Image (spheres, helix red, strand yellow):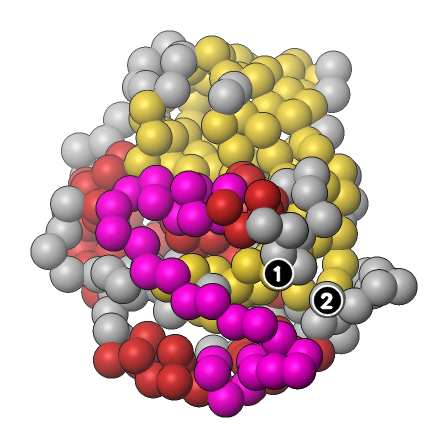
């Protein structure tokens, strides 16, 4: 179990979780080791050690950024990922319907219902849930500098930056389909969520071998509540300001901008991006209601 002590807003809950984990994940069925991250990238090192020790399972305690660090090591291995969502946005956990109640989340870990999910390579980086360029990436950068996490801090950044942001030009080739456009932002959705229960692509499926490329135009500010309502009611794909293209591989060339939002974290990459889906590359523990047949084996 790898715990990010600074993710999210409820740090006391993490201490309670560790106590509960020793009760729910105990001998003879589990041999539990709890590790705490001390710096950015530390979860990568801890996960490598877990894989080298042939651990059956790594439990990520934190948000989408923590999950990204752990999952990039686990992809392509036999070690499964479990999630206890204690981050800020928790987009992947919302999408996978992971319980936010600690006891229910630990029960889910103990049940060990595993699916094989897709992951996505973006140049030499990696994501599980969503990545994005344009305004999306700018918000991720500004939000990372905010002294407080949480939805209202995120909303403050969005409103503050929206008026002065100018849409950028993009050249996209997605599974042979060419698109040239100006956009407020483009999101690459392996799951359907930004976080905070905001749905960017209702049709996204983490097991279909495709990424939903969501191209969003800038709209008049007075229409934002309408678009926000479509986002929260999982109908954003009905907006005339949104175009969604599914692809297993794509290239995206940007005229300006170097940063991306990568599972909620700002990352600097080249202007030209190559996106490729890695099908069924990550074992994840999910509720049995998730729409895929579980693995025959159990963790």
Q: Quadrant of residue 177?
A: top right
Q: Which mark is residue 266?
A: none
Residue behind mark 2: 299
Residue at image coords 55%, 59%: 58
Label 2: element kind:
loop
Q: Are marks 2 and 1 in contact (CB under 8 Å)?
A: yes
Q: Is residue 184 above or below residue 103?
A: above
Per the image, is 42 magenta? Answer: yes
Crowd around label 1: few <14 · some 14–19 · many ≥20 (10 Å): many
Label 1: element kind:
strand
Residue behind mark 1: 57
- The tag earlier along the polypeptide, 2 or 1, is 1
Does the rendering let one see residue 184?
A: no
Q: From the viewer's perspective, is 92 left or right of 277?
A: left
Q: Is residue 286 above or below residue 44?
A: below
Residue at image coords 30%, 79%: 15
The quarter of the rendered structure image containing the C terminus is bottom right
**Residue extent of the magenta highlight:** 21-48
Foreground residue among 203 and 33: 33
Give residue 69's position: percent from left, percent from top. Answer: 45, 44
Residue at image coords 43%, 42%: 44
């Amino acid at each position: 179990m790898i715990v990010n002590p600074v993710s999210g807003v409820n740090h006391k809950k993490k201490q309670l979780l560790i106590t509960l984990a020793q009760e729910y994940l105990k001998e003879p069925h589990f041999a539990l080791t709890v590790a705490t991250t001390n710096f950015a990238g530390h979860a990568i090192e801890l996960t490598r050690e877990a894989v080298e020790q042939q651990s059956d399972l790594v439990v990520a305690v934190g948000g989408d950024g923590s999950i990204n660090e752990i999952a990039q090591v686990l992809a392509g291995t036999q070690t499964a990922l479990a999630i206890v969502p204690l981050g800020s946005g928790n987009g992947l956990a919302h999408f996978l319907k992971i319980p936010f109640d600690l006891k229910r989340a630990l029960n889910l870990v103990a049940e060990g219902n595993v699916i094989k999910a897709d992951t996505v390579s973006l140049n030499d980086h990696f994501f599980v849930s969503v990545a994005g360029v344009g305004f999306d990436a700018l918000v991720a950068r500004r939000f990372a500098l905010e002294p407080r996490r949480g939805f209202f801090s995120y909303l403050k950044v969005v409103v503050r930056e929206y008026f002065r942001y100018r849409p950028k030009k993009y050249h996209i080739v997605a599974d042979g389909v060419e698109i040239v456009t100006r956009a407020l932002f483009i999101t690459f959705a392996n799951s359907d969520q930004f976080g905070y229960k905001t749905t960017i692509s209702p049709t996204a499926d983490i097991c279909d071998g495709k990424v939903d490329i969501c191209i969003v135009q800038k709209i008049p500010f007075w229409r934002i509540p309408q678009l926000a309502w479509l986002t929260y009611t999982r109908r954003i794909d009905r907006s005339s300001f949104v175009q969604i293209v599914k692809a297993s591989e794509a290239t995206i060339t940007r005229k300006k901008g170097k940063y991306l939002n990568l599972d909620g974290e700002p990352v600097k990459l080249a202007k030209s991006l190559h996106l490729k889906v890695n099908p069924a590359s990550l074992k994840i523990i999910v509720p049995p209601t998730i729409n895929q047949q579980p693995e025959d084996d159990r963790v």
